[in-house]
Amino acid sequence: MTAADVYRALWRHKWFILVLTAACVAGAWYATVQQTKRYEAAALVRVQERGRAAAGNPSAALQASQELAQTYARLIGSGALREDMKTLVAACTRPSARDTSASSCEWLVGRRRAGLAPGTISSVKLTADNVQDLDLLSIMARSESPRDALVAAAAAPDALRRFIRRTAPPSERVVTVKAPTSSSLVSRHLALNVTIAFMLGLIFSGALALLLELFRDRLPEADELEVAVGHPVLATIPTLRLRQRAPPPQVGLDAAAPTGEYVDSEEAASPAGSGAAPERRA
Amino acid sequence: MSPAFLVEPDSASAEPLRSLRLAIEARLGSRETKGLVFTSPSPGDGRSTISANYALVAAHIQRPVLLIDADMRKPSLHTMFDLPLTPGLVDVLRDRLDPWEATHTFPALGGLNVLTAGSSLQRPGDVAASTAMGVLLEKVYNECEAVVLDSPPLLTAADAPGLASHARTEVVMITNRSGKRRQLVSALRKLTVTEANIVGLVINREGALAGDF
């Protein structure tokens, strides 16, 4: 199969390819639009190891902090903060916990406590990234609820503090650099998804068209057909325009066997002649 | 009712058929072929339309031309030309009539003569290769410049090889552009096995017609 054959085959199936590609694009658009909206909020923290910084070696302290940030990023991603988050939210949202300005509940200051539940907040998906070349850790909370995402991101530094207090040496501490102020809708990548669907649809439908062509057992072009079957192609007849004209006039012919005499239709036309029936030889 | 399914001899639609006639003439050369059996692998390939229009175009140049509806299973030329089905080919063969008694002539169509299929038969397959058919064809070949036979599709009936087994008779195979290659090869094999002479192929419905001059 030459490139020209491929081109011809694709051109013959152009409507099939277009319709299938359009269906892929429509499907991708619909699936993307139907996706559940997700919101994201982020807090920025610094994890420090006080001992080395105090020793007057800032470079070593930075490197240690970066390593710590990377370690905690992995821990947060693995869901290690879930229990601490749950405990924290439970402690701060209890009806008896009136003073939200207490150090462990500062994250709740200015936020509505109504409807906050430890289970809901702790189930918010937390991820973390070490900020490139810095000893900073960006903690991101993702949820279907914008408030839950915001509250979880706000509580995450305190939950991390609790976790470190429980598991790490006292020299490590967490400083909140930037608390989250709002949550934002995570993009559903509509344009990207539609573009990918368009490209894949085009490739898939093109491949399918070629496959159909292969199995369709189609007649080859006239010159190839002659070679394939060993007989000449006398003519190719396009779709003809067939007539529905007024009936030709009838004239009398010699009733004997055909003589080869030809009566031209114009000569044969008579003003009165309008019969449709041909002459029956007898 | 006027004859439908026919091209205007002066229109662009007639040109491909004129080309076909010239190609057949060139291909036959000095051979004494008089009868052309138009057949195709499958039904719906446009066999009757092409054979009728070929005969119409030929009738304007070669005279006389006889078009015979040799499709005794599913005749259609009588509908095309708005003719009674009987008497026709079968009646001529059965009752030993003079073929011209059952033939209809169209003076306004270049004097084209049409013989319809006639009465229905129980075993039409036996007729095509019969001696009676041979005698009939020999008679009309002697009296006509060209005889066009519209026969049933090859993959459903073996009439075309039967017709082509008579002297001075050759086959024109019509195939639809959207037809299957395998079917065409099977049909041609049927003809080759019976040693029928094949003039060549005609590809029907190949694109759209070019405009008039």
Image (tube, rainbow, N blue to C red):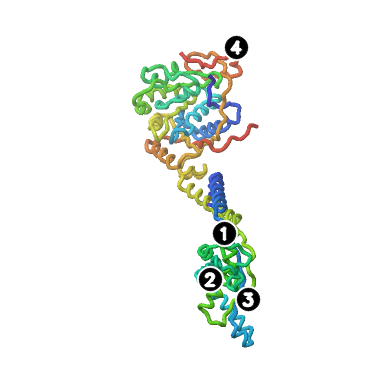
Q: Which residue is mark 1?
A: A145
Count of numbered badges drawn on the protein: 4
Instruction: Identify the chain of the residue marked 2, using the numbered disc in the image.
Output: A
Mark 3 and mark 2 lie on one chain; the one further toward the N terminus is: 2
Amino acid at dot 2: Ile
Task: Residue type at mark 1: give it.
Answer: Ser
Q: Position of residue B151 (x, y in %)?
A: 43, 29
Give the quarter of the image for residue B115: top left
Badge 1 and badge 4 in a common chain: yes
What amino acid type should be assigned to the residue bearing mark 3? Leu
Going from the N terminus, do you reach mark 1 or mark 4 first? 1
Dot 4 or dot 2: first in sequence order is: 2
Return the residue nearer the eye: A110 or A280: A110
Residue A217's place in the image compared with B134, above or below, is below
Question: Which residue corresponds to the image point at 59% horizontal and 85% vertical from the top-left?
Answer: A51
Which of pointers 4 and 3 lies earlier in the amino acid sequence? Answer: 3
* For discs 4 and 2, the disc positioned in front in the rendered view: 2
Q: Say which of marks 1 and 4 sits in front.
A: 1
> Mark 3, chain letter?
A
Q: Is residue A99 above or below residue A261?
A: below
Residue drawn where x is 45% and y is 44% of the image: A217
Residue indicated by mark 3: A134
Mark 4 surroundings: few (<14), some (14-19) or many (≥20) residues within 10 A: few
Q: Position of residue A189 (x, y in %)?
A: 59, 57
Alpha-carbon span between mark 3 and mark 2: 18 Å
* Residue assigned mark 4: A272
Label 1: few (<14), some (14–19) or many (≥20) C-alpha neighbours in 10 Å: some
**Tag 2 residue:** A76
Name the secondary structure under disc 4: loop
Query: Is disc 4 in the same subunit as disc 3?
Result: yes
Label 4, label 3: how far apart the Cα atoms are: 106 Å
Q: Nearer the viewer, residue A79 or B11?
A: A79
